[in-house]
Structures are given as structure tokens and as C-alpha cells.
Image (cartoon, rainbow, N blue to C red):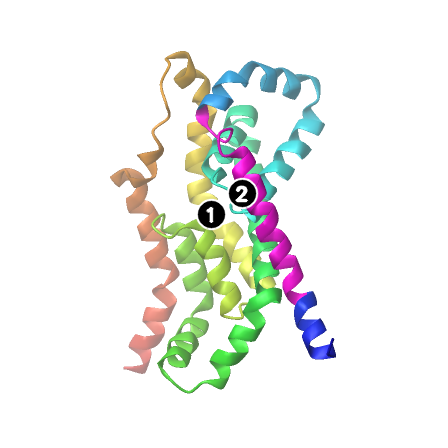
Amino acid sequence: MKPARAAALRRILPLVALLGVALVAGFMLRDHLTFDTLRANREALIAFRDNHLALAVVLFMLAYVAVVALSLPGGTLATLTGGFLFGLFPGALMNVTAATLGAVVIFAVVRVGLGARLAARIDASDGKVKRISEGIRANEVPMLISIRLIPAVPFFLANIIPAFLGVALARFAWTTFVGIIPGGVVYTWVGAGLGEVFDRGETPDMGIIFEPHILGPLLGLAALAFLPVALRRMGRA
């Protein structure tokens, strides 16, 4: 095997492995990452937390990181579970930290496997795609924070798109952490009240993030993130 081909294979292997594990885990856990599972195991989880707090924290965060890194359909449930088991604080801090670590894992794997080569091709091009990419890169921080604040952008896409644009790992990490704090706090707060919801035999309202009194401030924060960009453009006009 030629050295160049072998190097390319080594770069893409982690991505292939991640996708493989994600498919297997998604198939095996598809019926378990639900509110009903959490409801059915609530007493056992609380007892384990009370008897082994440090271990419960470690296992919860590892599970959360895995859910995000593998892009499993359980991120929101994991956030609610963090609030349910650990309260608004430190639950929110644990949720935001674990979600950021999981996002960094998938970002790094995608960037090593595909992102670097795609970014190089974009830089080598001279068409519209390159102009759009340069425009985004010129406003990386506002863009990265805004896609985290606006709930309409799927978390999975917000993890992989920056990898294709050649965003620096450190910048991706801190903007992810900062950008998901508001939404993370909201869902952790909902999770902290899950006990009462379960006692009533109900399901938590996951549409709360789109309520005007929640969505409005999030959109306002997203707009503030782009305020420096607008001011710079006004200064050039």
C-alpha cells in the first residue's frame, strides 16, 4: 500500500469506527433512551446516586459524552437526567461540560478524517463556495456561538459543520461551552422537576425552549453575538 493511501486510511479509521459504534449503539439502545426508561428506573438511579455519588457523577458524564460523540438520539434525555439526579446546580455544569466534551470528540474525529482535506479543497477553489467559507471564517466566533444559541440548528450539525470549515479545536470547544449554557440551564431546570412530572404520570414539555419567554432571550443573545460584526460593517460604510 502506498504511503499516501495508508496515511489517508489511518486518518479515516477513527471516523469509520465512530460511525460503526454509533450504528450498533443506536440499534441496541433505540428502545431504552426514553422517558419511560428513566421513569421506570428512577428509584434505582436515585439510590445509586445517594450511595455512590462520585461514581454516579463519573458514569453519568461518561454516558453523556458517549451519547453526544456518537450522535445518539438521547441528548435531551441526558440533559434532563442530569437535572433530575443532580439538580439545577451542579447538574447544569455537568451537562454543559459533558455535552462540550462529546462535541469535541466528534468534531475532532470528523476534522481528522474528512474536515482537513475538505477545508484544503475549499481554500484551493476560487468560486462561490470559497467566498462563503471565507465570510463565515471571518466571523467565526459570532457564528459558532449563534448556532449553539438558536435551537433550530441541530446539535449534530453544529458539531460537524465547523470541522469542515477548518475551525480551530480550542475555538470550537470554548464557543460550544459558552453557547450551550442558556439552553442547557433551561433543560436542566426542567429535569430538576421531573420527579413531580412523573408522579403526575405526565411527560415533560420539551417545547418549552420555543416558548416566547425562553426563545426571545436566546435570539437576543444570538443577535448580540453578531453585534460586533454589524458595528464593523457600519464603520466601513
What residue is shown with label 1?
180
Q: Would you say residue 65 sits in the magenta stretch?
A: no
Contact (Cβ within 8 Å) of mark 2 with mark 1 = yes
* In the depicted structure, whether residue 233 falls above or below residue 180: below
Give the magenta-colored segment's residue range.
11-35
Q: Is most of the magenta stretch helix, strand or loop?
A: helix
Classify mark 2: residues with Cα within 10 Å, few (<14), some (14-19) or many (20+): many
Closer to the camera in the image, 11 or 81: 11
What residue is shown with label 2?
96
The residue that appears at 31% across and 51% down in the rendered structure is: 219
The residue that appears at 55% across and 51% down in the rendered structure is: 103
Question: Residue 222, can we see it?
Answer: yes
* Residue 174 in picture, x, y percent from top left: 55, 56
* Residue at the bottom extreme, as displayed: 126
Q: Amino acid at mark 1?
A: Ile
Question: Residue 101, can we see it?
Answer: no
Q: Would you say residue 23 sits in the magenta stretch?
A: yes
Query: Separation of disc 2 and disc 1 at Cα?
Result: 7 Å
